[in-house]
Amino acid sequence: MAIPPWSIELLRRGLNDVARKAREPETIEKLRTQASEILHDLPQTAARGIDAVIRSAEAGKKSVERWSRKHTTIAIEMLNASGVLLTESGSGVPMPDKAIEVGGEMFAGDAVRGPAMAQRLSKRLQRLLPAGGGYDIAVTSSFSSALSAFSLLVEERQLVVHRHHAVRMPGGLPLPEAVGALLPVIQEVGGSDGIDPRDFDGLESFCAILADDGRRPVELMDLSTHNALQAVVLPVATLETTAHAQIPSAEAMLTAGADFVIMAGDGICGGPPCGIMIGRAEEIQRIRRSVAWPVWAASEAVEAMLMVTLETAASHPDHVPVRQLLATSEENLRGRAERLATRISGCDRIASCQITAEDARLTQGGRWRFPSRQIRVRHKSQSADDWASDLHEDYPAVLAKADGEELRIDLRWIAAAADGKLAEALGTPEESGTPEESGTPEESGSPYERGTPEGRTEPSGSHSEASDTEPNPS
């Protein structure tokens, strides 16, 4: 079909018009400008694409590194965001650097050992005990070993547990079974509803064992008419009395009249896993001279690490990591929570994020509570239980608590320098910037609480802070 003449005329006029406009200076300048903008945008677009590829590659590399370390490393680093210091998985808090250093030197095997070393360690440990009480100290391989070793005192005195103190120890055993695990030598008296001194009538020259299970403080009994000694078992305690009066201490119990204190060397005390027996020098020395003592005694390396930790706590408590975390202020925790919440909210995997203010604890269900801050995070596609399980199996392991559909991240027992690791473990990209912004240690300041400026104010926006519903007894 032939094109009509009028159509040909319209096409000719249109082409002539385009050619005429193309020759105009204004049109030529517009084309040049548009071409320049296109050429200018091409490198930026390419750069953004390359940056995205690099970020994706770096994330993949880090995932491979975490997977490799998780399957090859024996000691998996843990960030304790559960809000409870003493858990079945550990505390997530290291010992002082000096204690780790001396432990490595002792375990290396090229240091002087034997009676000379044992005597030197014993003298330095005795210097840390309350003056004027005629006390001695013995260190065992574990807290349960200390309870079992104390049963050797039965050779001199009958051991008695009032049923009101027949509480369950951290290992799961009730106190009578824990003390008499190898030697069934414990006699039980009284009832579980309370203590009456008359419950001990008929007993002479015995040692009553009392225990702090975390629900109520230990109150010594008046057994002056029974020729009796009293031993106090403290699963959670410090050696010296601290500014936190609610935390039991061996010093306070001995000053109050206790004859013996049996406590854990790790946990809030800050040392290696071990047990500590403190008390009347004659009885402690008799236990150490027993042929069975080597079964429960701690190694010289563990005893040296405990000694350095206790000395550090006495002179520079801020150099003991667990004490630093205990002393971290609410302002400090709030500022860190705000920065973490801001960073986490920018991740496309996060559905919601808010800040709350509930108490952290030393033990689950114990009376020891401390103000803290939490970040409650909800994942877009994963349940809180599955997310918590995956985090616990990752490297570093993150111990967090699932609460409904939200993951509860408590900051009380996490060092400020580990905030960046925590954020990355939750799936946020690595953040660049100053040490203060990224949570990495600076060159100066406390070795376990660096890069943590205080006095931060509440951010406006999506992060809210809930008030604690229970009063804080501290």
Image (cartoon, rainbow, N blue to C red):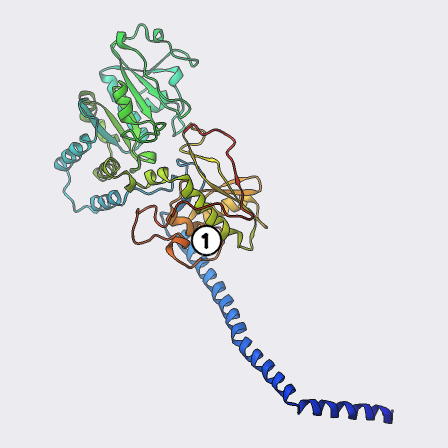
Q: Is residue 234 above or below residue 53?
A: above
Q: Residue at x 30, y 11 (%)?
A: 222
Three-letter code, disc 1: Glu
Q: Quadrant of residue 163?
A: top left
Residue 347 percent coordinates (x, y): 53, 54
Residue 155 versus residue 59: which sits nearer the camera?
59
Q: Which corner quadrant of the image does residue 291 belong to?
A: top left
Q: Position of residue 365 (x, y in %)?
A: 45, 29
| Label 1 packing within 10 angstroms: few (<14), some (14-19), many (20+) | some
Q: Residue furthest left?
A: 116
Q: Give how far across and how far down residue 431 sits, in percent.
A: 44, 57
Left or right: 159, with 115 as reference point: right
Looking at the image, residue 93 lies above or below residue 134: below
Viewport quadrant of the N terminus: bottom right
Asked if one can make out residue 181 in the rendered structure from this viewpoint, the answer is no
Disc 1 is placed on an element classified as helix
Q: Read off the residue under disc 1.
A: 424
Give the camera-side residue of 36 and 285.
36
